[in-house]
Amino acid sequence: MPQDTPDPADVFAWTDDAERARERAGLVRTLRPRPASSPLLDLAGNDYLGLTRHPETVAGARAAAERWGAGATGSRLVTGTTELHAELERELAAFCGFEAALVLSSGYAANLAAVTALTDRESLVVSDAGNHASIVDGCRLSRARTEVVPHADPDTARKALAGHTGRALLVSDSVFSVDGDAAPLAAYAAVCREFGAALVVDDAHGLGVVGEGGRGALHAAGLAGAPDVVATLTLSKSLGSQGGAVLGPARVIRHLINTARTFIFDTGLAPAAAGAALASLRLLQREPERAARAREVAERLYGRLTASGLTAARPDAAVVSVRAPSAAAALRWAADCREAGLSVGCFRPPSVPDGISRLRLTARGDLTGEEITRAVDTILATAPAGATD
């Protein structure tokens, strides 16, 4: 007897069960379009230096769009590379202390490019457990053997590398996006050099905030420009634009141009984004105090929140993470802050590697003392039961 033809309406019926499970766990995510001008005090975005609306940044985007058009028109290897892209790469590399740079369409694409192009099936990748999802995905796509080591644990990384012969790299965030703590870069570099491994560091949350004038965590650690070190970064945080980049020895950059799939097969970064990032970079070089101000704001937020009984991780850059009693409590807390005029980030599983839900605050360098007070007062006034000591 012939089987009944399956109902097309049932093909994705399983997603309804998945949605109900997310609702029970308090893990539903929704898109919330924001207006061009919002009355909310923003401590949720990653505009660390307050440059995304700076007149010079906006003017850089406008001038680039008017000169080069709205889009890059193709991949970087075809028509997507303009003189502006090359100029941005030269100035990024010089500012951060590296020999060369390669600009991609996002920081996510930059991490995928670096990890996949510098490994093969016989390679070993040692990855910090606190790494960003883009690094995790790069490890998966690389098809290399990956050893995930405990967060900020050079000794375990050493043990992972000790038994491997052949190509290897250790990959880590410089500043971790969940708690805002810094990686032990000097110790990681020493471990890599002991075994001839490469060190790949995602400096997305370090650029513009850490190091002399915001030159990044690798520059601060004395590792920028080293022949065995590669950095990835984003243009969408401190530089207030969009896009990503890989920085390192010139021969590594040449290798990525020829082998990194997220570079070869992706449309080039839009000229407006490149122009905005270049304008912000030049502004930061003229006003290096912006980096120190972002760190100062982070310390002030941390100090006042913890003094009031909340549990927060001490920030090493511009991320302030405040622990919540549960995923549902974190979601409600963020919503209550929003109702009170404050936008904060809400990190819940699976976005947090340790399973602990948090509010995530961006310590923007352009926040005034009055705004800092307002933010702290709002967070304390809306804190759920169990959030304070």
Image (cartoon, grey):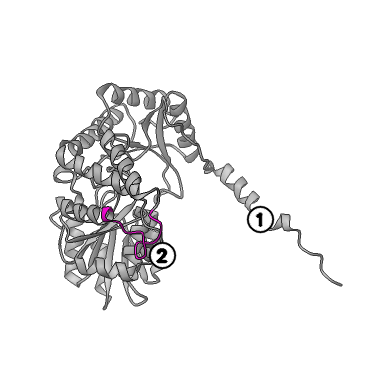
Please provide percent x and percent y for residue 81.
Answer: 32, 59
Q: Nearer the viewer, residue 162 or 321?
A: 321
Q: Residues within 10 Å of mark 2 (few under 14, many from 20)?
A: few
Check disc 2 and give the amino acid type: Phe
Asked if residue 209 lies left or right of residue 107, the reply is left
Please provide percent x and percent y for residue 50.
Answer: 28, 35
Please provide percent x and percent y for residue 1.
Answer: 87, 72
**At 37% across and 72% down in the image, what residue appears?**
144
For mark 1, what is the residue? 12
- Furthest residue in direction front, as rendered: 67
Q: Which quadrant would the C terminus be assigned to in this image?
A: top left
Asked if residue 84 lies left or right of residue 133, the reply is left
Please provide percent x and percent y for residue 229.
Answer: 20, 63
Q: Is residue 20 visible?
A: yes
Q: Is residue 102 magenta?
A: no
Q: Nearer the viewer, residue 107 or 172?
A: 107
Contact? badges 1 and 2 (CB < 8 Å): no
Which mark, by number, is residue 265? Answer: 2
Q: Secondary structure at mark 2?
A: loop
Does 103 appear above or below 331?
A: below
Q: Is residue 177 visible?
A: no
**At 34% across and 31% down in the image, what residue appears?**
310
Q: Total marks drawn?
A: 2
Cα distance between the residues tagged 1 and 2: 30 Å
Q: Residues within 10 Å of mark 1 (few under 14, many from 20)?
A: few
**At 15% across and 55% down in the image, what residue appears?**
97
Residue 47 location, quadrant:
top left
Q: Which residues are magenta?
A: 72-84
Q: Earlier in the sequence, mark 1 or mark 2?
A: 1
